[in-house]
Image: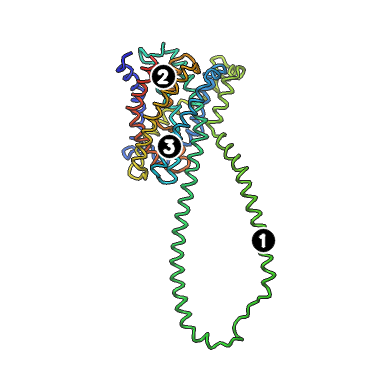
Amino acid sequence: MEFWSLFMMASVPVAEIMLVGTLGAFLASGYANILSADARKHISKILFAVFGPALVFASLAKTVTLEEIISWWFMPVNIGITFLIGGILGWIVVKILRPEKYLEKIIIASCSAGNLGNLPLIIIPAICNEEGNPFGEPSTCNSNGLSYVSFSMALGGIFIWTHTYDLMHKSAQLYDKIQNESRLSKTIDEKSEESGNAHFNIRETEASCSDQDALLSPSSKPVQKDAEQPMIVPFLSRRKMRSCMSNNWERFKEITGGTIHQIAEELLTPPMIAAIFGFFVGTIPQLKFLIIGDDAPLRVLQSSITLLGDATLPCVTLLLGANLTRGIRKSVLKPLAILAIITVRYVILPLFGIGIITTAAKLGFLPKSPLYHYVLLIQFALPPAMSIGTMAELFDVGQEECSVIFLWTYLTAALAFTIWSTIFMWILT
């Protein structure tokens, strides 16, 4: 196919996202004021706990089988490579630019975590439904593409809700620590000023009473009870020893049990639980027979979950548009940091992707499906995951900075992703 025809085909799904995102921006503006800050926070919680998990489960349970998972073994490796390279590049960016401490992990997350679920779910069907697409007949292309994207979305959810979730959680903890230290320092300064004034008044009082103190005889002054000291010191030493032992024990529990608890907490998020159940239903024929299909005895479960999952894409895209307009004047993020994220996601990572996928195909690691190769390639050229914004809302950290990152990366994606998508299809055809 001609390059220009491929370019027009690739621009359709990006244009759809921009249109819906523009509506979200309008709903969040002062003209409509529907998607207020509180409304966005509540919708983010519903997406995290209900809509997103429902979409993951419905897609996996319906499309993924054990044989396909085995044949697609390179996809988790590919996603891991995108997170690894992006994370390393993000770490280099923060070491060079030295942003605010609590922003470092947000920048690394934006460089490493791509939109592996929602954006491909819009892009692949839009391309498959285009007349003359390079991936075959529309119904077959849609069916295969949905399977690839569902698997990619589930795997991406595992990486995002463990690695990226941990980064955002630590960023929130660091931000809270900085805020608490700032408040504590302010309180100490205020108290120091008050105590300085009080000390000045006391010195004036002592100076006025110095003559009276000189008239007192030595016998009238209080007597120090030195005899009690040997009894108090051992008591304090034993109490201090018990306190140190208790602190050491708490520290040991924090190092061991705290780490295990944190890992379990990150692995048991609603999207992760949904992905696990989706894999079970999809790979176990008996469970799939009960739930999936027009004749399944429990098909009402699948239809209800699918109904909830269908709300994910419009809600996420509306929230994206609403969040894009926030924080442009409030953000402390340097323009160079935004430019670095754009360079990582739209220049360096796609070039790595072409080399890695081309090499893997030559070595025979990939099934001979151009659509499968295309899905692997676009994983290197996606904008930052929308889930980062959801986590920022959940943890109440860096919302303005995330909105600025999303604003410029998704505006840039309108051109950059379209160009890379066109190049990928041109290479594969």
Does residue 319 lie above or below 372 as drawn? below
Q: Is residue 8 left or right of residue 372?
A: left
The spot of residue 420 in percent (x, y) is 36, 24
Q: Residues within 10 Å of mark 3 (few under 14, many from 20)?
A: many
Please tell me whether mark 1 or mark 2 is closer to you in this view.
1
Identify the mark at residue 385; answer none if there is no mark.
none
Where residue 415 appears, x then y in whole percent?
32, 27
Q: Nearer the viewer, residue 130 or 415?
A: 415
Quadrant location of the C terminus in the rendered image:
top left
Q: In the rendered image, is residue 111 in sight?
A: yes
Q: Earlier in the sequence, mark 1 or mark 3?
A: 3
Q: Return the residue at label 2.
A: 125
> Which residue is farthest left?
4
> From what the image shows, is residue 362 above or below residue 258?
above
Q: Quadrant of residue 331?
A: top left
Please state if 130 lies on the left or on the right of 218 as rendered.
Answer: left
Separation of marks 1 and 3 at Cα, in angstroms: 48 Å
In the rendered image, which quarter is residue 66 located in? Answer: top right
| Residue pictured at 31% horizontal, 19% vertical | 8
Which circle's residue, 1 or 2, is located before the other in the chain?
2
Looking at the picture, tell me which residue is in the foreground, 321 or 175: 175
Closer to the chain start, of discs 3 and 2, is 3
Q: Residues within 10 Å of mark 1 (few under 14, many from 20)?
A: few
Label 1 sits on residue: 239
The dot on residue 90 is 3
